Amino acid sequence: METIHRETFWLISPGYVVLLYSFAAISLGVFGFGFYRRFRLWQSGQKEKVSWHDVKANLRYFLDMAARQKKIKRDKLFGLMHRFVSYGFVVLFIGTCLVFIDYDLGIPILRGYFYLVYEAVLDVFGLLFIAGLVIAMSVRAGKRRTRLRHTVMDQAFLWLLAVIGLGGYVLEGIRISLSQSSYAIWSPVGYALSRLFAGNPLFAAESYPIWWMSHAVFSLLLLAIIPYTKLFHFLTAPIHILFQPVKRTGKISLPYHLDEQSPDEWSNPAKARGVHKISDFTNWQLLGTDACTECGRCDSQCPAHLSGKPLSPRSIVTKIRDHMQPNCEIGSFIQPAELQSCTTCGACVEACPVSINHIDLILAMRRGLIQNMVMETEAESTLLKLEEQYNIWGKPWSERADWSKDLQIPRLDTEDEKQKQGA
Ligand code: SF4
Ligand code: SF4
């Protein structure tokens, strides 16, 4: 009986194998350097510890947002696309890791029925992966989501992923058509392709190594560019969702609690320090900006943005990401008017699928503005009136209550009223 197992370098000459490992080493090196570079930049921020007081809630949040993709699902078609692509990508990646364990580590796991199930599962998820990419390409080509930015690079990333997915099927189809293995039906897509390829010189044994090498080069190219492009969110988004303490909409992080400060600390301005430069953000805030997928959900919900104010929460996040150098001054790439336009309504935080807290970013930078004495004229004069006259109109004390004269509102400081209130 035919032995059921995976033949890893079938029809591949030793020269090609050496080339593959050389490319793999370069690609891993480029990936590692890119990752380390960003990691150092995150580390340049203020240290913010992960809060583990509610591990269960964090895990539940991760399952809902990263695994079940609850927020992404709100857009039905795009939600379907994203689940197809991400689940397909993860399963194909696990499949590649199993090949590494089987061949490179010499632990024979891809054998017998396990191997057959492995083939079937990868075939199905590969198909979902490609279906998801087709949906994404057609939505982007038709510009059917105004919230999306339609750049050439976005299309290029989709094509690169599609070429890798299709390349895997071509290799499988050629392998099955030439080897005529008795268990080929466990790879239904590869099996169907093998029937199409039979007798076609483009998919003959001589062409196989070229197909194989090009598939490997595209896959390694993808690995190398991940930390340098928005594809980095493949890694950073799940990390951010899992480790960033669960943010509930409407809850704003405070820089400090006044009632927990000693009188000496009240006059210590360091406690209330706002963000002036990139390294004033926390390490998790910086990592979070690398998790941004540029999906535009925050912009599409932001009342300030929609009413024509000079604020785009997506741009706030991507500008911080793109200017991430420890000493880069915020004022060199974000205008005060952008920060002052935010109403702190929280719609962006609620919409963001990767748990970015725009309000915390914006308020921290606003605190920086106030320390630099940059404030909207109207807000500044209102605060001054409050400070000096205890009312927002700046009226003298004797006229403070004039507005209530004809409204028959009881005065709490009269004797009658005090008695009524039981004072
Ligand atoms: S919190 Fe600010 S940035 Fe976010 S949606 Fe509301 S106004 Fe826009
Ligand atoms: S900040 Fe969040 S919602 Fe806004 S574009 Fe980035 S990932 Fe999308």
Image (cartoon, rainbow, N blue to C red):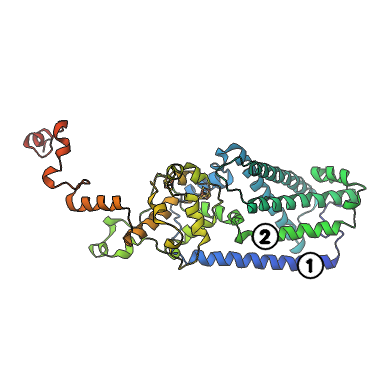
- Element under disc 1: helix
Q: CA distance from mark 2 to mark 1?
A: 16 Å
Instruction: Tell me if I can see residue 7 in this picture.
Output: no
> Residue 308, percent across and down?
44, 44
Q: Please name the residue that numbered disc 1 is placed on.
A: 19
Q: At 68% from the left edge and 47% from the top edge, which residue is drawn?
A: 88
The residue at 54%/45% (across/down) is 65
Can residue 176 be spotted in the picture?
Answer: yes
Give the mark nearer the N terminus: 2 vs 1.
1
331 relative to 418 in the view: left or right: right
- Relative placement, left or right, of 420 versus 370 is left
Residue 367's disc is none
For the residue with label 2, is its CB less than 8 Å from the closest atom of ligand 2? no
Residue 423 relative to residue 339: left or right: left
Residue 114: x and y in percent read 76, 49
Mark 1 crowdedness (10 Å alpha carbons): few <14, some 14-19, many ≥20: few
Left of 382 or right of it: where is 67?
right
What percent of the width, then of the height, locates residue 419? 8, 35
Circles 2, 1 touching at the beta carbon (< 8 Å): no
The image quarter in which residue 364 lies: bottom left
- Return the mark for residue 223: 2
How many C-alpha atoms fall within 10 Å of the one at disc 2: few (<14), some, or many (≥20)? some
Using the image as rendered, state which of residue 304 and residue 22 is in the foreground.
304
Question: Looking at the picture, how far across and down is residue 81, in whole percent?
Answer: 64, 42
Q: Amino acid at mark 2?
A: Leu
Identity, as a three-letter code, of the amino acid under mark 1: Leu
